[in-house]
Amino acid sequence: MKLVDPSGNEVTSKENKDAKELEQQMSKKIEKLLEPVMNKIKLSGAQVPQQQLMQLSSAAQQMLHNRMIYNLLQKVGVEDLDEVLSEDDVEELSTSLKNQVQMVDKSDMQEQMKQQMAQQQQENNPENS
């Protein structure tokens, strides 16, 4: 969670007790949101890859952020998103998101998948090494 001071500079949680408290509150809410999913995983005895657990945690955090923003907008009486989100904002974020995507050509992707499969087979059959 990022907080900024009145001049727009980021205030880290190390510097700000309020930010640290908000982060702790958010962590508790995320844990509560994920609790039924985690219980279902434990009860099923299934294994969930670490990457998927991270995605679940990220999704939970995003869901809570979205709900907080919605509740805030309702509380202050914003009825049209154009009041708080301009087309320039969307364009800027779109550019940022596009720049985060890494493109891989098909032959590179196939080679990576072959290497991963070989590595998984080696991990699953260590006595054959």
Image: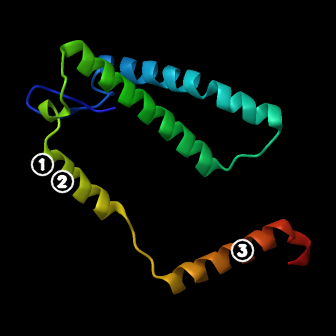
* Residue most extreme to the top: 75
Task: For the N terminus, give its image quadrant.
Answer: top left
* Residue 102 vs residue 79, the one in the foreground: 79
Residue 93 lies, with reference to residue 111, above or below; the image says above
Residue tagged by mark 2?
A: 91
Cα separation, mark 3 vs mark 2, equals 39 Å
Mark 1: which secondary structure? helix
Residue type pointed to by label 2:
Glu
- Number of marks present in the image shown: 3
**Residue 88, label in figure:** 1
Work out whether mark 3 precedes mark 2 in sequence or the reverse, and give the earlier one. 2
Residue at image position (12%, 30%) is: 83
Nearer mark to the viewer, of 3 and 1: 1
Q: What residue is rendered at 80% in x and 72% in y?
A: 121
Find the distance from the CA under tag 2 to the CA under tag 1.
5 Å
Task: Locate residue 107, reporting x and y percent.
Answer: 53, 86
Residue 89, position as x, y percentages in the image: 16, 46
Q: Is residue 33 left or right of residue 15?
A: right
Disc 2 to disc 1: CB gap under 8 Å: yes
How far, Cα to Cα, is label 3 from label 1? Answer: 44 Å
Task: Classify 10 Å Cα crowding around label 3: few (below 14), some (14-19), many (20 and above).
Answer: few
Residue 123 place in picture, x, y as percent: 79, 67
Type of amino acid under label 3: Met
Dot 3 or dot 1, earlier in sequence: 1
